[in-house]
Amino acid sequence: MLKQQLNLKLSQKLSPQQIQLMKLIQLPTQAFEQRISQELEENPALEGGKDLDETPDDDFGADEDYETYDEGNDVIETDINVDDYLSDDEIPSYKLATNNYSADDDEKETPFASGTSFNQYLLQQLNTYRLSDEDFSIAEFLVGSVDESGYIRREVVDIVDDLAFTQNTYTDEATVEKVLKIVQELDPAGVGARDLQECLLLQLERRERTPSVVLALQILEDAFDPFSKKHYAKLLSKFDISETQLREAIHEIEILNPKPGGAYSGNTRVIEHIVPDFAIKIVDGELELTLNGRNAPELHVSREYSDMLKGYKESKEKSKSQKDAVLFIKQKLDAAKWFIDAIKQRQQTLYVTMNAIMHHQKDYFLTGDERKLKPMILKDIADKIDMDVSTVSRVANSKYVDTPYGTKLIKDFFSESMKNDQGEDVSTKEIKKILEITISEENKKKPLTDDKLAKILKEKGYPIARRTVAKYREQLDLPVARLRKEI
């Protein structure tokens, strides 16, 4: 039997405006500029730049109301206070609220390189070879298979199948191997290799055959595995050589390029142009925070739309098309006004959040010493500025700050805390920095194991376990002791 029940339920929902505001806060400077351009294109009631008309028309007073009508001739009371949209057009209010943005002429722009792609560069060299039509087709396909590092990652048997299915070229593995040798003669040396060993060998084979180069070739051909694992004792025994000879041979290998494709200056790859959202300067011993001026655009409501409202107000007979136009105008004016207000809120939120981060990490920003970074989590900043943790996360996640010590990602200033031997909270970043310095100063002939590193850190007042040392070392992209060993 069906029963009806009445339940009371409280739920929290974000309005579309709040959702859009959160999205605006999350955007870095470049993406924010694109969002503004999109809004200017989509909303004709919104215009960029200063409004040249400094005096709003007197006919649009603060007490004027306007009526619109629906299709049934019923009056819909719609208050369109034009002054709400136009009163701040001369200089936007959000630009007067806080003087926390830098001047546009202080912006630094990065030039973008353009030119021939890496594959086109290889094809240009290939055109200088005299090849049969079939061999040229195979060589062209191989060049197209070279990745940005200069390697061909596919097996020869797979390439034979691809040539048959995609190029209608039927060949065998021996022919592909023969043409591959031609491709591997192209510059830069090592291009077209199928693995690191082959890449290094191709480069060494172009070098003058000195005793060190000859020994380096033997090591790569006959003992690549012990070499890659730095089992130097095995190499000394296998080749019956001295430490000096081994050191010179290893030096010949170390100066080679493991990614020959990356050496080509015209290589087309994604260039990430970082635009700092904030700038921190030290002025008379005090920190000064500014917000990038591109985050404070000049926007105002279109005067043409205001004139349309004036014409509607003064007209005695209001046609249906005029009524529909006024409804459309009101929607666009509301959207324009909200967008301007959202930019103001975004600007203030960014500044307040970064200001709290700057003061929390004041010791670091004054000295640049990463060991002075304090433990800081999102909740610490959220409590200081009385905002939600998610808002702080959106500000910190993808934005950068220009400091006297370089451009830094804001989220890198956040870290967990650990207790030192005195019971004080210290940042994990401080421990990682000390660990990095300790490893850089170690004797490379006898590198420190994770157990020894843990003991050294404990002596310095940071009692952490060996597995924690191993975790921090991996986060710093530092290899184990055996792979840090030098002859």
Image (cartoon, rainbow, N blue to C red):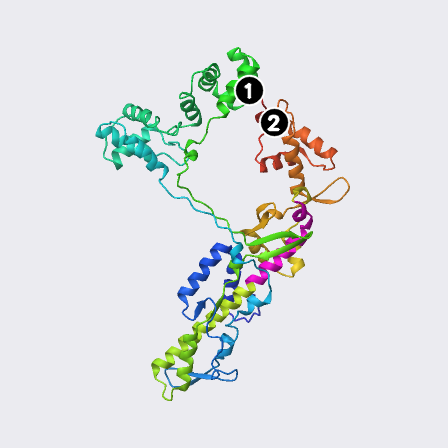
Percent of width and height locating residue 302? 43, 72
Percent of width and height locating residue 90? 51, 72
Give amino acid for label 2. Answer: Ala
For image coordinates 47% across by 46% down, the residue present is 272
Quadrant into which the C terminus falls: top right
In this orientation, which residue lies closer to the viewer: 13 or 403? 403
Horizontally, is 175 left or right of 60 in the view?
A: left
The quarter of the picture where residue 155 lies is top left
The quarter of the picture where residue 208 lies is top left
Mark 2 and mark 1 lie on one chain; the one further toward the N terminus is 1
Observer able to see residue 480: yes
Is 284 in the magenta? no
Circle number at residue 231: 1
Percent of width and height locating residue 396? 57, 53
In this orientation, which residue lies closer to the viewer: 147 or 129? 129
Query: Circle 2: is it few (<14), some (14-19), or many (20+) Cα within 10 Å?
Result: some
From this view, report whether residue 259 is shown above or below residue 354: above
Residue span colored magenta: 346-367
Which residue is under mark 2? Answer: 481
